[in-house]
Image: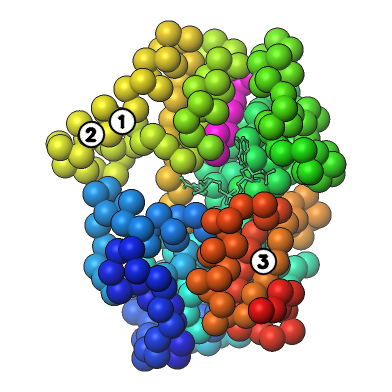
Amino acid sequence: MKAFVLEKYGSALRQTEMPVPIPAPHEVLVRMVAAGLNHADERLRAGEFKLLFPIDLPKVMGGEFAGIVVETGSAVTDITVGEKVYGYVGLFAAGTLSEFVSVDARDVARAPQSLSLSEAAGLPVAALTAWQALVDMGHTAQGDTVLVHGGTGGVGSVAIQLAKHLGATVATTVSTKNIDAARELGADIVIDYTRDDLAQRLGGTSLDLVLETQGGTTLLNSLEVLRPGGTAIGITGPPEPVFARRIGVNRVVRLAIRAMSARVRRRARRLGVTYRFLFITPDGAALQEVAKLADDGVLRPIIDHVRAFDQAQTALDDVLAGGTRGKVLVTTDPNSVTTHG
Ligand SMILES: NC(=O)c1ccc[n+]([C@@H]2O[C@H](COP(=O)([O-])OP(=O)(O)OC[C@H]3O[C@@H](n4cnc5c(N)ncnc54)[C@H](OP(=O)(O)O)[C@@H]3O)[C@@H](O)[C@H]2O)c1
């Protein structure tokens, strides 16, 4: 089978021939139909995660996928050959930029029936991020007011839809060209981050939760617009001590993480708000809920474009170049390709 591997930190992803994996008892072997590219793939490639999450190289890259089950491990009872599934495998497992991928059965869910597999592959990372931020960590409830940064990006476009479904009033930041698209996704307050002052545009609106996707000054400014007791959930960092404890890193790394987040935590303390860092984990059960929401017409994946599988490095470059609306995917199905060359 063909797969894109990282041979050493910093080098480009290389397409290579590998044996088709044999599923372990708790795994399912999936013929990959489409896979999403993410900024995390680039961070992994560049070696940014190696202190927190050391991995063995060479590694098959890619985190999310949709495809068809072709074999099940002996302990798998609830998924059968021929089923359409989608999932996120996390950083450590063999990746999804591969014609076949063997995945822990607990990390996959039946794909939404109302979507093609190429559409479904646009959901796992974005929807799990939105779910783990808004539901698991943020406990978003009816009547809350939530700010989602980057509202037409991969994560933001799903987070707006999920926050609306949970009953929140949703504010979002986008660039000028994406104002209408953010409104179409359901955002109540749309802020142009290239022109508007965040606090001024919110005009005293009291925010319960911010899903912060940018870091830096955007994160610091986000703390200022929360109500006392509110929470900012950052997904680009910096990581903070609660996260360090959760992943169980050694003392040196814990101290480094404490130092990296000191300024943000100090500012949050002064304002009486909380800062938490989220790094998503695989969760097939949450994706099953997401599939229901997709089939109920509550959530739809926003796909910018789909490239042929052998253009995985170009597809990752597209994500990094910015200006995309929603997700960039690769597919093994020639009929699902939308961008050639
Ligand atoms: N920790 C985790 O588990 C986790 C999970 C998923 C993603 N992430 C991270 O979250 C970030 C977003 O991911 P993504 O997949 O949504 O990326 P994406 O699809 O590339 O979207 C990025 C969005 O950010 C917007 N943006 C750029 N500058 C901005 C600013 N100053 N203020 C507000 N918005 C701005 C862009 O809007 P315009 O196009 O309108 O300029 C774009 O819509 C990435 O850094 C990714 O690594 C982390």
The amino acid sitting under disc 3 is Ala
The disc label shown at residue 120, or none: 3
Foreground residue among 189 and 311: 311
The residue drawn where x is 60% and y is 74% is 330
Q: Are marks 2 and 1 in contact (CB under 8 Å)?
A: yes
**Residue 162 screen position, x and y as percent:** 69, 43
Q: For the residues marked 2 and 1, what is the alpha-carbon distance in whole angstroms?
A: 6 Å
Q: For the residues marked 3 and 1, what is the alpha-carbon distance in whole angstroms?
A: 36 Å
Q: Residue furthest left?
A: 251
The amino acid sitting under disc 1 is Met
Q: Quadrant of residue 123?
A: bottom right
Dividing the image into four quarters, tell me where ligand 1 lies. Answer: top right
The amino acid sitting under disc 2 is Ala
Q: How many labels sit on residues?
A: 3
**Residue 218 screen position, x and y as percent:** 55, 28
Quadrant of image for the N terminus:
bottom left
For disc 1, the marked residue is 260
Can residue 176 be seen in this snapshot? yes
| Numbered range of the magenta stretch | 207-213
- Whether 103 is drawn above or below 106: the answer is below
Magenta: predominant secondary structure element?
Answer: strand
